[in-house]
Amino acid sequence: MSVNENGEFRPLIVAFCCNWCSYAGADLAGSSRLSYPADVKIIRVPCSGRVNPMFILRAFERGADGVIICGCHPGDCHYSTGNYYARRRMTLLFSMLDYIGVENGRTRVEWCSAAEGAKFSKTMNEFCEKIASLGKNVRLGDLRCKD
Amino acid sequence: MQRIGVFVCHCGSNIAATVDVKKVVELVRYEPGVVFADDYMYMCSEAGQEKIIEAIKENKLTGLVICSCSPRMHEKTFRACAEKAGLNPYMVEIANIREQCSWIHKDREEATEKAVILARAAIAKVNLNTPLQEGESPVIKRALVIGGGIAGIQTALDIADAGYPVDIVEREPSIGGRMSQFDKTFPTLDCASCILTPKMVEVNQHPNITLYTYSEVEGVSGYVGNFEVQIKKKARSVDMAACTGCGECQAKCPLGKMGKIPSEFDRGLKNRPAIYMPFAQAVPAVPVIDRENCTYFKTGKCGVCAKICPSKAINYEQEDEIVTEKYGAIVVATGFDIINLDKYGEYAYNESPDVITSIELERLMNAAGPTGGHLERMSDHKQPKDIVFIQCVGSRCDDEKGKPYCSKVCCMYTAKHAMLIKDHWPDTNVTVFYIDVRTPGKNFDEFYRRAVEQYHVNYIKGQVGKVIPQPDGSLMVQGVDLLDNKQIMKKTDMVVLAAAIEPNKGVRKIATMLTASIDNNDFLTEAHAKLRPVESPTAGIFLSGMAQGPKDIPETVSQAGAAAVKVVGLLAKDKLKTNPCTAKCDPMFCNGCSTCANVCPYGAITYEDQLVRGPGVNETRRVAIVNIALCQGCGACTTACPSGAMDLQGFSNRQITTEVDAICQ
Amino acid sequence: MTKQEIEKNVELIKEISGCDPYKCMRCGKCSGSCPSFNEMDIKPHQFASYIINGNVEELVSSKSLWKCLSCFACIERCPRNVEPGKLIDAARQLVERERGGDHLQAEDIPELLNEDVPQQLLVSAYRRYRR
């Protein structure tokens, strides 16, 4: 659903949130009724280190316009080191994606603790705005999945 | 194919006001795998759960999707509900359509559409769920406490009183730790030994406690509930069973009279013989021969102690012994020491014997100390008429010389020292140079105010730049008074430095053996700074006392009790339920590269030679084995695995991919 | 000075000295070590807060600027690496680098004359600190 009835571009954004910090932060944003666009859909993972680059590529392949990975702040990972690996991995991956045409603005890593509901909401709002300004993602699309 | 039941909760109006619940039910009814779909007001209620159980039984459901509040709220509830109905609890997934949908979106159509998408993702995942069994591992009902100071002693007593056997391993010849060196404790001014020694005796006599003094932990293997530890009992050269603690050997040791060996307990202010008990109330009351300095061990001559011992307890041939024991839980209570002051030349600590640290002052003021409780300058043994205390020596430092943290106890102990000195010797002039006075505890600020208001201790806000020993034996202190904006040149008889505390030097070795996290300052890290302050992230390891962070005695005792309760909670279980969402290695694809083992924060992966049989394969390979008791299910190994052999149950590659597909379709 | 000039000077001082005045915890060890403390009007422990608050003008026209001996005792002893000696040095640099500054009047010179001060010093100071 990239274009709604009004002809507006509605981006498709996939967020991978780690169970211990950022998912809890998202829940806090919800409890505090801090809104962000409905374009963001969250997938819960046990740790940001669980996010395999294949998932991100798959998301873009299937029509996502933006992917954001949220995890615990460095040093606070529930599993001590998972977010460090995520940080390194994503730096490399996003650099490669940028090179092949999936602009840097379409991907993001954000550290959000369980107490930062406001930050979560703000981040999502900013990210959605950015993706809306970048427009529809045309790279990596798998034509077999297009309607 | 699964038989999935979908339940969409109204949550009163929390969800229903924004999300068209009925529409969601209709739209997911025909998703692949779904055979039943319904909605209800409050799914988590008794009635709601009854509906779920009924539906599972009637429709022979193999999987469940609940569209409701956050799984962090009710995942456990719905899993338990499924189990009651005879369905494996791990065949349940929750779609968060409240905190992450109805509560944050205003447009009904948008919210409903998103709810449907989230429900679809959960359904797609459940289609790939497999029943998981929580594993079980046994628990050895014995605890180990490393460190015999007040933290270790209190933890051991609490565990032992709960009925569990506990061993204390202490490096020094006696338990007691730092607290045994103190004179009085704040804020009550209790005599430290008076409140500590009864506990030390209790530990020694407690039927559930075994003491290993003059011993060290050499090696640790295993995991929570099943640790195997090697303890090295260093040779005391004295037969503990025969020794009566009479003290003759200490009195007659020729090195004692020569005064060559500085006493560690008295911080070098006094000397001790080669055969010694660290202090009179030592537990156990058995001396130890310092083989490095003993004449007999260095030259083969002497042997006086063996000759005069009435119980024939001296045994020069005694050797170190290694004892192996099994434990269910380990508590680290290794304590602290003060930093080395070599880099602080400006305070003349190494030049003048009249510049001392606070812990040396404790020994001087202690009636059982090197001067029998008389406060004297170590240079000429005269009583000081003027004393200057310097705070924050090496604490709150941003450079390599000192520590970045506040040592927490110094403001209080200096106020204590100042008051005690003024109380015993009222005509002494006492000045304290401070940056801030930190007195956060109960009755703490009142305690410090007494020092100023009742005892007229002179508190000056400002630091000391330099301490200059004078030719006449006094000390010139150059400091500043920031409030009066004046520089001060003060002549004084004695300077006491409140040096920063640091964790005991041996802690890094122990933390490595236990794979317990340690921070840049060598303090042991807690599992969660606020909510789990006495547990290490490594399961089965607990923290007590200064080893975890600077703290005073009341806090240490509190924390010791907390650690003891956590240990008892662990030992009370006969079996530990292990999280079933653990990693699993497919030996067909594993090439034994060790990448997974290197990224595992818990050391849960080991390698084994396994016979692998499959289409076209019949050979022994080195494959990864995951210890499900240790694995916490983070998935780091799964992502790192280059061949895709490792997968995480509950959050497998296929499951997450299918969620991505469902969201993006 | 205008607000922009002040801000520019603050940034310049931070850049020249390489120090972060925010790290100061107001302990006073620098003042406790300073041999020129009594001669100064603005004391070493105040340098960091003057810079944070943008009081560059006062700092630059103070006596402290010239009373500092560059002995580096405060730098050596500061527990927070704030290094007030470097801050005051940087402030001094601001003056010295200023072209066309008017820091030495001809009328002041007779007062500064004495046997111990070589004439050459006064001449070079006059050249450096005047237009």
Image (tube, coloured by chain):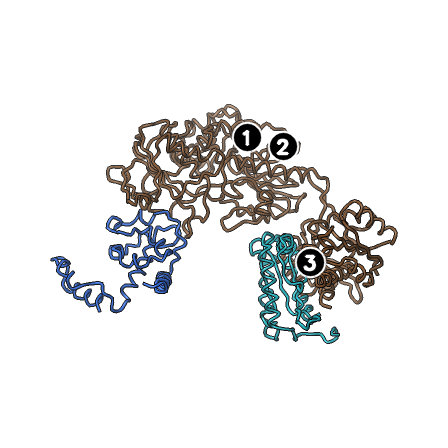
- Quarter containing the C terminus of chain B: bottom right
Q: Which mark is residue B101?
A: 3
Residue A30: percent from left, percent from top: 65, 55
According to the picture, the residue beneath numbered tag 1 turns out to be: B239
Please identify which colour was used for chain A in the image.
Answer: cyan
Residue B413 lies in quadrant: top left
Asked if badges 2 and 1 are on one and the same chain, I answer yes
Total residue callouts: 3
Image point (66%, 71%), residue name: A9
Say which quadrant the N terminus of chain B sits in.
bottom right
Local secondary structure at mark 2? helix
Describe residue B569's horizontal placement relative to residue B547 as left or right.
Answer: right
Q: Chain of mark 2?
A: B
- The image position of residue C103, as x and y in percent, is 22, 63
Judge whether residue B146 can be spotted in this image.
Answer: yes
Chain letter behind tag 3: B
Q: Are marks 3 and 1 on the same chain?
A: yes
In this view of the protein, which residue sits in the foreground, C45 or B495?
C45
Nearest-to-viewer mark from 2 and 3: 3
Dot placed on the residue nearer the N-terminal end, 3 or 1: 3
Q: As shown in the figure, which amino acid type bears the numbered disc 3?
A: Cys
Q: Chain drawn blue, letter?
A: C
Does label 2 or label 1 sit earlier along the sequence? 2
